[in-house]
Amino acid sequence: MEPNKRYLKLCYILKNPDKYDSFIFGSSRANFIDPVKIPGGKYFNMALANGVPRYHLEDIKLMVRKGIKIKNLLIGIDFLSLLINPEIQENDLSRKHYPVSLVEKFDFYKRYLFFRPDWKTVKLSLSTNGFDRATLLSNGIRVYNNFDSSIELNPEAHVKAEKFQTPRARYSISSDINGALDQVKKLVQFAKEHQINLIFYINPTHHITYLNLNLDNYYEALKKLADLTNFYDFSGLNSVAIDNMSFLENSHFRLKTGDMIIARIFHKDNISLPDDFGRYITRLNVDDEISFHRALLLNYMKATSLKEDTNSCLNFYSLKKTRKKLNCTLDRINGIQIKNPNKPLLITTPWIKIKGYDIAPALKIP
């Protein structure tokens, strides 16, 4: 089973308070930002699965309270940071917060001691080799050398792999998006009070996953974020997002993509970067950035829908494998509804082709 990286990493940092002065926080996607390659500080990567701003703020406050002197913070945000409700994960043993008081410690260890796994979890654990947890404590990241080497050995098979045909995450922007942004606001205030250099960036999102977000609300989230802080935006249908070679699967980008993020943020000229990847956003240019997102969306639609000889990025048959019923939706706005097979389908993402059915696109593009 996945260890509680949040707890393990905090234990290590608190026991070695002078070893690092800079930290990377984020979801599991931040795992692919190599701290060794970042200039200007001794970085450690604190990434954890489904990490959200509230967790980052709690852990950063604890570190400062325990005497850790923080010089720099690099914090990755993505659609997940804005979608996941932290309360839903309160009892998830893979990300329980570090216990401080005696009562917290009693509750913390009790939950692990009396954890009763279901049969599915047992089978998964028995069939997985796992990994050496100590490797996490060298710089905080888990390196997937086997995955990377297999990709490079057969890039064509990787690009055409079935795992890229279905979105990894199917979320709609939470109605409590302001709750997540409030945590970002508190992070900004805390960093300012403690004279910490704080940099936010938005992770690259694989195009299939990006296309299945509620994009109107996502753009609204970007605008609200820009009111709170400046950030680097690596999301959208840029040249990296539409290249399967930049990703392990539909959820996580590769280390080489992480190196590109580092190069853009820290102005390193040892890596060639496309112009459309990683734009610096402020409240003054966020409207232009949203227009840029929409322009990339329109270009993508034309490339995948309007040419008869172009392969669709997603087809009905791959969707059907992930749904119990034919009458299904991708999410609240980008959906497929099949109520009467004799009538045209209403599909809000017009680049999705469904063989044998008429398509009535309904997407607002200026």
Image (cartoon, grey):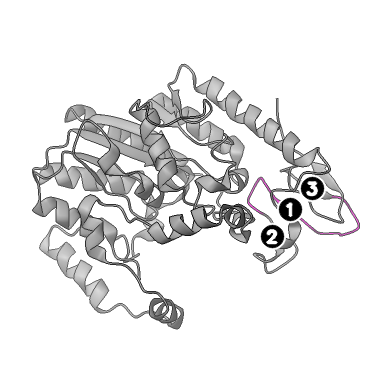
* Residue 173: image location, x then y, percent: 53, 44
Q: Earlier in the sequence, mark 1 or mark 2?
A: 2
Confirm whether residue 7 shows in the render.
Answer: no
Q: Secondary structure at mark 2?
A: helix
- Give the residue at mark 1: 336
Residue ID at (42%, 52%) = 85
Residue type at mark 3?
Leu
- Give the residue at mark 3: 346
Q: Residue furthest top?
A: 284
Q: On the rendered structure, is 149 left or right of 26?
A: right
Give the CA distance from mark 1 to mark 3: 6 Å
* Residue 266: image location, x then y, percent: 33, 28
> Magenta segment, which residues?
330-344
Residue type at mark 2?
Leu
- Give the residue at mark 2: 319
Does the segment drawn in magenta span residue 118?
Answer: no
* Residue 346: image location, x then y, percent: 79, 47
In the image, residue 78 sits, relative to residue 122, either above or below, namely above
Q: Secondary structure at mark 3?
A: strand
The front one of 61 and 271 is: 271
Query: Which is closer to the viewer, label 1 or label 2?
Result: 2
